[in-house]
Amino acid sequence: MGLEPSVFMSQVRSRRPLVHHITNYVTVNDCANMCLCAGGSPVMTDDIDDVADMVAVSDALVLNMGTLSRRTVGSMHAAGRVAKSVGVPVVFDPVGAGATPFRRMVAESLIADVRPDVIKGNHGEMGILSGIGGGVRGVDSEGASGDVSEVVRTIARRWGCVAVSTGEVDYVSDGESVAVLSNGHPFESAVTGTGCMLSSVVGAYVGACGMSLGSVASAVTVFNVAAEEAAAVSGGPGTFRQVFLDSVYNIDGPTVDRMARCSL
């Protein structure tokens, strides 16, 4: 693929995109800090009387359904419609899709109504949304039932988006090509909210660099290379969580490009 994540990383850091989040209360602070460390400028507001005006002046919108309520679902629909009307890219994280009938209904209705530019979930969530099959227990993945490359390609073609399926190996597709990304560390799955934090980083990258397979794959790669660097100096998940923010903030372009493991 010839991916050079440093090119996209440089644009994010110089442009400081404003990323509007409607996200879950378990990880909201971590997402804000991760967005800042990646080079973005986060805003977290979810009241329906505020979201339309806020998203209209933002560079990207991140919708995360980790802690669902009917109030925030309404705000997600409202913000998403405005974002699409003014050309603000929407990143949707269907946390726990398929774990309950309500979560599956919300995920499918948001996708149909908003038509997100990026749909990013774990292998179980994406397998369920693709119709190919997958398993979710709570908000954790039990894996896709089929070929993950076909899962992301199917979702990307069906909804005209870039689809990202995360796990030990990550897959990104624009409906034609599939990038297979092999960076990352097991500590990421031992810390609550790393998937949510990744959505914030993706929001910063598409907000600054525009929608493309390259911008999304670069966001995932930078995040996971930084995780590898953080894990190398961490004694376990607790210290990793703290060092991870430092690593995303401090990582340099040559290191990312050298360590990136991407195949197409």
Image (cartoon, helix red, strand yellow):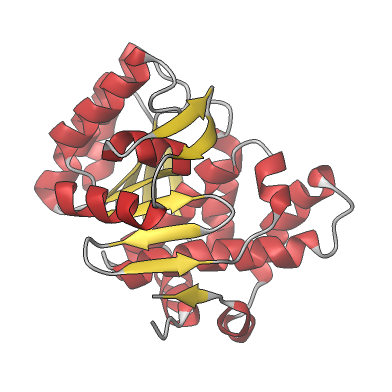
Residue in front for this viewpoint, 148 or 54: 148
Is residue 104 shown above or below 9?
A: above
Q: Residue at x 19, y 44 (%)?
A: 83
Q: Residue at x 52, y 67 (%)?
A: 221
Which residue occupies 34% across, 14% down? Answer: 101
What percent of the width, then of the height, locates residue 203?
39, 54
Q: Position of residue 47 (x, y in %)?
A: 33, 23
Q: Is residue 177 left or right of residue 215?
A: left
Compare residues 183 and 226 and report the one nearer the observer.
183
Q: Does residue 167 appear to the left or right of 248 in the view shown?
A: left
Residue located at (22% from left, 52% from top) = 88
Whether residue 199 sits left or right of residue 174 in the image: it is right
Q: Nearer the viewer, residue 15 or 31?
A: 31
Q: Quadrant of the N terminus?
A: bottom left
Residue 136, given in percent of the width and then of the height, sits at 49, 28
Query: Residue 31, can we see it?
Result: yes
Q: Is 247 placed above or below 145 here?
A: below
Examine the rendered structure and indicate whether residue 99 appears above or below residue 87. above
Give the mark count: 0
Asked if residue 94 can be seen in this view, the reply is no
Please determine whether, in this image, residue 110 is positioned above or below residue 155: above
* Res. 127 image quadrant: top left
Left or right, 192 with reference to 240: left
Across and down, in percent, residue 208 comes to 34, 66
Q: Residue furthest front?
A: 146
Quarter of the figure with the C terminus: bottom left
Out of 143 and 79, give the one closest to the viewer: 143
